[in-house]
Amino acid sequence: MRRDFDPDHMPVRAFYKLMTAVVVPRPIAWVSSVSAAGVDNLAPHSFFTVACVDPPIAQFTSVGRKDSLRNVEATGDFVVNLAPEPLFQQVNATGTNFPPEVSEFDAVGLEREPSLKVKASRVAASPVALECALHSTIRLGDSVLVLGRVVHAAIREDALDGDHPDIAKLLPLSRLGRNQWGDPPPVRAIDRIPYDQWPGHFG
C-alpha cells in the first residue's frame, strides 16, 4: 500500500519538504563568492552535483535570489568548498540569512584562503576547493540553476590516497529531510559487471 501525494493539490512548501526528505542524502556545495563591493559570502546549497565531464562543470541551485547567486552573476566566479563533518556547526551557521554587507567568514570565524584562478576566497579549513568560472544560469520557476566550469581543484595533501581523494579523510556531510544532516557514511566497494560477464550473476 502506497500513499499518493499530488504536487498540484498541495502547498508548494509542503511538497518541497517531501521532496527533500526522499531525495537523500544530498551532497552540499559550500559556495564561497564575493560581491561587486568586495564582501565575501559563504553559504551551503544542498541542490548540488556534477553536471558535465568535458568540460568539467559543477552545478548548484539557488532557491530564490540569494547572495550566492547575485554575487556569481556580478563577478562571474565562485568556489565550491567541501563541507566536512568537523565543520558541521560552521556549515550550518553559514546558512543564516545575514545581510549582504556581512561576510559569513567573519560572522562564524572561518579563515579565508586565496584562490588560484578565481576572485572568490576558499575556506581554508575545508579539504577540497573547486574553483569555478560561471558557465551559465538557467531559471526554473522560483529557482536558478548555476553552472560553473571547474577551472582549478585544490585538495589538501592529507585528504589524498596517492592522487585520489580518500572518502574516509574527506568526511563529507550531507543534507537529509527537515533539519537533519547525514554524517560521513559507511563505504562499500563493488565493481560494475561487464556485459560479457553478466550470465549467471542474476539467475
Image (spheres, grey):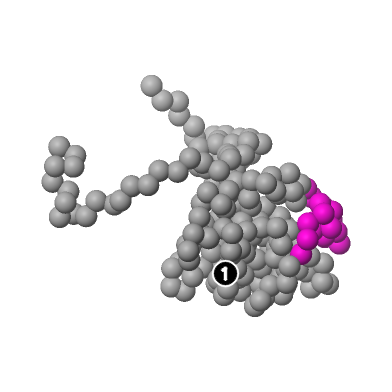
Please tell me in which quadrant of the rendered image residue 32 appears.
bottom right
Queried whether the magenta region covers residue 157, the answer comes back as no
Queried whether the magenta region covers residue 104, the answer comes back as yes
Left or right of 102 in this view: 79: left
Give the vertical position of 15 relative to 27 (above or below): above
Question: Residue 35: x and y, percent?
Answer: 78, 69
In the image shown, does 124 or 201 lie closer to the viewer? 124
Give the vertical position of 140 relative to 201 (above or below): below
Question: Residue 145: x and y, percent?
Answer: 58, 60
The part of the chain drawn in magenta is 96-112
Q: Pointer 1: what residue?
A: 153
Residue at 43% across, 73% down: 54
Residue at 55% across, 72% down: 149
- Numbered marks: total: 1
Residue at 18% across, 42% down: 201
For disc 1, the neighbor class at 10 Å (few under 14, some 14 to 19, many from 20) is: some
Question: Residue 64: x and y, percent?
Answer: 68, 54
* Quadrant where the C terminus is found in the figure: top left
Q: Secondary structure at mark 1?
A: strand
Left or right of 123 in this view: 5: left
Residue at 53% across, 49% down: 168
One can see residue 7 in this view: no
Q: Residue furthest top?
A: 1
Q: Residue furthest right?
A: 101
Question: Residue 95: x and y, percent?
Answer: 73, 49
* Quadrant where the N terminus is found in the figure: top left
Give the vertical position of 87 relative to 162 (above or below): above
Name the chief secondary structure element in magenta.
loop
At label 1, the amino acid type is Ala
Please tell me in which quadrant of the rendered image residue 109 appears.
bottom right
One can see residue 182 in this view: yes
